[in-house]
Image (cartoon, helix red, strand yellow):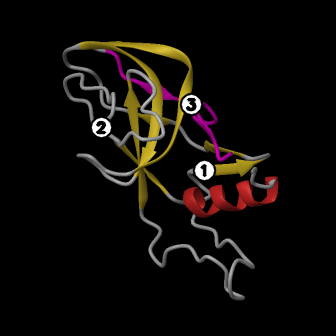
Amino acid sequence: MSASNAFENALLDLILTNVDLANMGDVTGLRGSSTAGSLYISLHTSDPGEAGNQTTNECAYTSYARVAVARSGAAWTVTNDTGENAAAVTFPQATGGSETATHFGIGSAASGTGNLFLSGALNSSLAISSGITPEFAAGALDVTVA
């Protein structure tokens, strides 16, 4: 079974931009949060998988931290069944350690296990070592719901 394009877009809008998913259930549909809050972007050294959480294969270079991104239309765009970051996402500069990020995740927690909602492969892997500041330009992080 597959979700329709309209539902995929609406679900991504609800998750990423806090826009109500209209006409689902009662007249008000599935409503966004009264306080939108943030989602937390994580970096991973391999695919965290559908059964993973935010710590599964998560990067751990010295000074690494997840990045908070607001659930808003200023932070995310949703078109053609794809959600993507609308602004640059910049991680803390590595002050030690060395690893290669291949995936990113979008989850619920600033740190710790947290729920991993969505994840995706980076367009190209990123070698991280001391002095490197991982940054992704607007539109570089794409997710879909299928």
For label 1, the crowd category at 10 Å Cα-Cα, with few meaning under 14, some 14 to 19 and many 20 or more, is many
Residue 20 spot, x, y in % from top left: 64, 73
Q: CA distance from mark 2 to mark 3?
A: 24 Å
**Residue 130 seen in render:** no
Q: Disc 3 marks which amino acid?
A: Ala
State the residue position of label 3: 137
Q: Disc 1 marks which amino acid?
A: Trp
Residue 113 spot, x, y in % from top left: 27, 46
Number of labels in the image equals 3
Picture quarter with the C terminus: top right
Residue shown at the point (57%, 34%) measured from the top left: 141
Q: Earlier in the sequence, mark 3 or mark 1?
A: 1
What segment is highlighted magenta in the picture?
132-146
State the residue position of label 1: 76
Front-most of residues 94 and 48: 48
Residue 93 spot, x, y in % from top left: 29, 24
Front-most of residues 74 and 13: 13
Q: Nearer the viewer, mark 2 or mark 1?
A: 2
